Amino acid sequence: MNPNEEKLIKDLRLHSNDHSPTLVPHPWFKDKFQPTFFYLDGHADLLLTVRALLYLSMRAINPDLGSDDVMDRNEEEFIHQAMTIANRLMPVGEEALMDHLNLFYREEKKTKEGG
């Protein structure tokens, strides 16, 4: 394990209780977790979210793949839906843990560029 990884793990362990728990043990699946604050407005919201995530994933992998007028017109809505889900999965206060990850990636990038 490199020094940046060791520092990241140490920082995450040190600050793991500084925020509300994002994950709780899943009631039915052993050794699995579920998000605490995640919610959907219903089945339609679930289907629209899955559609949005699939579309954005396909566009990220291959921007020219399966382009059609209907999907292109809804691209902004798909981005909004994905951001809404990301916001629900990362409750207020959790951003501090992301700061540790961002620092790790910056340090890793410096290490790779310097070495």
Image (cartoon, grey):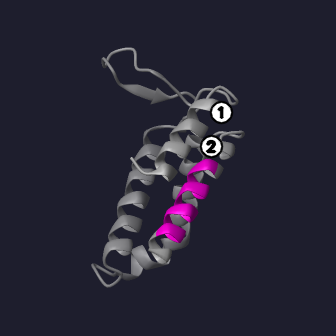
Disc on res. 97? 2
Q: Position of residue 94 (x, y in %)?
A: 65, 40
Contact between marks 2 and 1 (CB within 8 A): the answer is yes
Crowding near the residue tagged with mark 2, few <14, some 14–19, many ≥20 C-alpha atoms within 10 Å: some
Along the line of sight, the residue nearer the viewer: 45 or 30: 30
Q: Position of residue 31 (x, y in %)?
A: 33, 21
69 relative position to 45: left or right: left
As drawn, 101 above or below 88:
below
- Judged from the image, the secondary structure of the residue bearing numbered disc 2 is helix
Crowding near the residue tagged with mark 1, few <14, some 14–19, many ≥20 C-alpha atoms within 10 Å: few
What residue is drawn where x is 62% and y is 43%? 97
Q: Position of residue 37 (x, y in %)?
A: 59, 31
Residue marked by disc 1? 15
Query: Mark 2 or mark 1, which has the lower sequence index?
Result: 1
Q: Could you say which quadrant of the image residue 112 lies in?
A: bottom left
Q: Position of residue 59 (x, y in %)?
A: 37, 74
What residue is drawn where x is 59% and y is 52%? 84
Tag 1: residue type? His
- Residue found at the very far left of the displayed protein: 66
Tag 2: residue type? Leu
The magenta region covers 100-111
What residue is drawn where x is 32% and y is 73%? 61
Along the line of sight, the residue nearer the viewer: 29 or 65: 29
- Compute the Cα span from label 2 to label 1: 8 Å
**Dividing the image into 4 quarters, which one contains the C terminus?**
bottom left
The overriding secondary structure of the stretch rendered in magenta is helix
Along the line of sight, the residue nearer the viewer: 109 or 92: 109
